[in-house]
Every structure is written in C-alpha cells, then in structure tokens.
Image (cartoon, grey):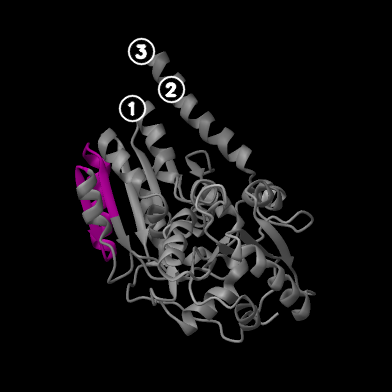
Amino acid sequence: MDVKKLVEIIGADFYTGVPDSQLRALCDYMIDVYGIDPKHHVIGANEGNCAALAAGYHLATGKVPVVYMQNSGEGNIINPVASLLHGKVYGIPCVFLIGWRGEPGVHDEPQHIYQGEITLKLLEDMGIDSFVVGKDTAEEELRDKMKEYDKLLAKGKNVAFVIRKGALQYEKKVSYSNNYMMVREDIIRHIAQYSGDDPVVSTTGKASRELFEIRQAKGQGHQYDFLTVGSMGHASSIALGIALHRTDRKIWCIDGDGAALMHMGAMAVIGQAAPDNLVHIVINNGAHESVGGMPTAAGEDGLKLVKVAEGCGYRRVYCAENYEELDDALKSAKEKDGLAFIEVKAAIGAREDLGRPSTTPVENKEAFMGHLFGELAGKNKQN
C-alpha cells in the first residue's frame, strides 16, 4: 500500500515517533512532506516521550495524534498508556503505527524474536485494539477499519495498526547525510586498538555489527565485547554495572547519539556514581542510521552532548571531529583515571555488505563473562 493512502485514511495532521526500518516508507514520507516541523512531525527521544507529547497535542487541539514506532518500543509506552492515556485515567485517544519486527514465521534477528511473539498480546493487555496491515491489505478494508476506530477514538480509546514487512511503499527514498568526515567503522577500529583486551560494551545497531567484523578480521575472538543487540539506550547502564564491580579494569562503552538520547537520564546516574574506570564514547552522526537515517536531536545544530556530560559530572570530557583528535582523546582516556566522555562526530553511512554477528547472544554473553571471570581468577591466584 502507498503510505500516502494510509496517511490519508487515518486523517491526522500530527505525527511523532521513533524511526523504524519496517516503517521506512512512512519515515521518508514524513521527512519529505514535513521535515522536522514541530507543528506536524516530531522525532522523539523514546516512544514513551512520544506518547506523552501526543497527549499534549490532544489536550491543546482536541484532535487525534499518531505515534509511530518499532514494536520494541512497546515497552517504553506501557507507563504513559496505562497511567495517562488509558480510559480509566484521562481517556486520551491516540493512533499507534507499529512496525512488526520478529513476526512469528518471518526470519529476523535474535533481539526481535520474543518481542515479535508478544507484540499483539502486549497491545491487548494495554487495552489497545489492533489491526494488522500486510501487503495484501485492501484499501477498502483499511477504510472500514478506520471507521470503526474513529468511534473508539471518540470515546478516548487507543488503537493500533501493526505493519508487516513490506506492507508500505513510498516512491521517494530520502537520502540522509551530514558534514562530518570520519567513518564509524574506522572510529570503532581506533577504539578497539586503544581498548586492547579491556571489556567493551557496544550499543545496538550497526556499531555492534561493525565491532564484531573488526574483531573477526583481526582474528581476535569476541570475548572482549558485550554486543547489546537490543535494549536500545541501555548500553551505558550495562557498562556502568560492569565498571562498578570490576574496578580493576578499564571499561569502554561504544554508544550512539540516538541510543544516548533515548534514555539520557542514565548519564546523570553515571555521573553521580562516577566510576574512575569507565570511558563512555558516543559516536554522533545525528541520525537513527540503523533504521534509515532520520535525524536525532543531537545533530550539527542540536544538543551538545559534551555539555550534557559536563553537567552530569563526567570528570573528563572530549569532543573529536578528526582522527587526530580521536586518538588524543582515546590515549588520554586509556592512560588516566576518572570518568571520561568522548563525543565523536561521524558521517552517516556504512558498508553495504556489512554482516551480522554469527554467534548467538547467549554465546556472546558466555564468552564475555568467561573472559571477565578468567581474568579475575588469574588475579586472585596472583594474590
């Protein structure tokens, strides 16, 4: 179905969401038609943020908003749906557009399998009526369903369209770019060089995929790295948990701007805990690149992440826009103690032949823990 037809049938004039590759046609349409016009389209930090923003829109206009997301974002909307939007609270209507990753019977990555199994059940448990849109969904079928949904929305209910892979099309594919020159894969290669055999926690998306292939190419094995294949926005908290309990090692976190923004409160907690052995690196390309490239709030004219880190209490803060500055920052972080934050400005883009980890998440966890515990056992023997 042409995404323009879906937008016309829904009939809303305000959309907010977090980008999803399954909804690439919708995301491209929104950027093509509205760009980032806060009157009509806002890319949120996380899906719960979008649900609350949608509530504000309804309170101000009386109209029905649309929130779009990948199904992994359902967890982030549970609280605002249950305690803000729900009919037993304020009864604020909202249409959700949800990309169905990990749909049963459709091959997908490990982090999407369980989420895909429970997608419709979670909506049901939240009291959200859902309708699945696939390649064969007819326009009239969708129009009839929207007429039903208009009646529910008028009563302050929430509804959802769950979008299957390939269900939506848009004739234009928007191209995203910025003015930075460093390539993320090369940035990660520099990080791996300086981190050596130190534990590394990498964020979900292409960063972890690139780190895996860098280790593979060097024949290093993958025991040094915890690849956070899902759980977007939580890599820095995982790294904090490790750093606080393995003070004998330098712990490195490779993060992304979209992930850092999604749960930015984690930076305040990290700053308060202030482990001397944690290096938090945010590779900032100002984009949700792993799901298409739509902009984040941390782009060239947006949020200054180094200022956020300073405000949160990170002891040493660096910003690198070229490889010389990156190496200087990594060298300093390696050699000196004190909670460190490095923002690295990167171009948008990745190799077209970029693969995915060939090990399972459980195998990755066991190798990583084996490396950590092996080190610890060796140190205990020496003592």
Q: Is residue 125 at least partly visible in the picture?
A: yes
- Residue 56 horizontal/vertical position (percent): 41, 62
Mark 3 or 1: the one toward you = 1
Q: Residue at x 42, y 69 (%)?
A: 42
In the image, which residues are magenta?
313-342
Disc 2: CA contacts within 10 A as few (<14), some (14-19) or many (>=20): some
Mark with earlier residue (1, 2): 1
Furthest-front residue in this view: 155
Q: Foreground residue, 47 or 286?
A: 47
First of labels 2, 3 by sequence position: 2
Which structural element holds mark 2? Answer: helix
Between 58 and 281, the one nearer to me in the picture: 58
Image spot of residue 124 (x, y percent): 69, 50
Q: Give the total number of marks visible in the rendering.
A: 3
Q: Mark 1 sits on what residue?
A: 248
Occupied quadrant, residue 129:
bottom right
Asked if labels 2 and 1 touch by Cβ distance under 8 angstroms, the answer is yes
Q: Name the residue rendered at 38%, 70% in the picture.
A: 347
The mark found on residue 383 in the picture is 3
Asked if the magenta segment contains residue 328, the reply would be yes
The foreground one among 151 and 208 is 151
Neighbours of disc 3 within 10 Å: few (<14), some (14-19), many (20+): few
Which residue is identified by label 2? 376
